[in-house]
Amino acid sequence: MSNDHGTHHAEGHGGHGTFGSLMTGFAMAVILTVLPFGLVMGDTGLSREVLIGLIMGMGGLQIIVHLVYFLHVNKNVEQGWTLVATIFSVIILVIVLAGSLWVMHNMNQNMMPMPDMDEMMSLQSQQG
């Protein structure tokens, strides 16, 4: 009985990925997190549109890395369910990316402008 359980466990373990593949996925996820942060914090000289496109592209790549390396969505396991999961993931990815851009655009358009700091300081000194 114990032998059957051990054999079943060993067969089931193959679909979960190896330590090396998990570390590869982790390294790729870290790189795809650090690069956009560096682009935003550093003075790259890129236009705002290009910068947003690069950040959104790396976000999409990171979602794919998570699907492949951590959720093990690949062509080897249960073909039909993997196709459905991939299509669902792409739809969710498009909704999240488009929704994020839409929300950020609307917030940028509808925010009240901040007055200059000098103007704020002069108003405070006049009142106080």
Image (cartoon, helix red, strand yellow):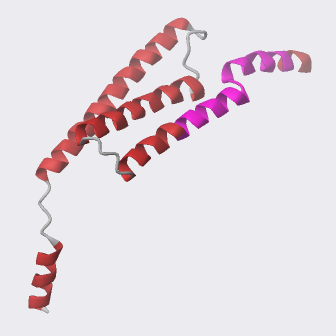
| Magenta span main SS | helix
Report which quarter residue 57 is drawn in.
top left
Q: Is residue 66 above or below residue 125?
A: above
Please name the residue shown 16% across and 81% down the image. 121
Residue 81 position in % (x across, y down): 50, 12
| Whether residue 35 is situated above or below residue 5 in the rendered picture | below
Looking at the image, which is closer to me, 83 or 1? 83
Q: Quadrant of residue 74?
A: top right
Between 59 and 83, the residue placed more toward the observer is 59
- Which residue: 12% across, 48% down? 109
Camera-nearest residue between 94 and 113: 113
- Residue beneath the point at 45% across and 17% down: 86
Residue 49 placed where, x, y %?
24, 37
Question: Which image quarter is the N terminus in?
Answer: top right
Is residue 18 a member of the stretch shown in magenta?
yes
Q: What residue span does the magenta drawing correspond to?
A: 6-30
**Residue 57 lies within the magenta run:** no
What residue is shown at x 66% (from left), y 34% (from top)? Answer: 23
Q: In which quadrant of the rendered image does the C terminus lie? A: bottom left
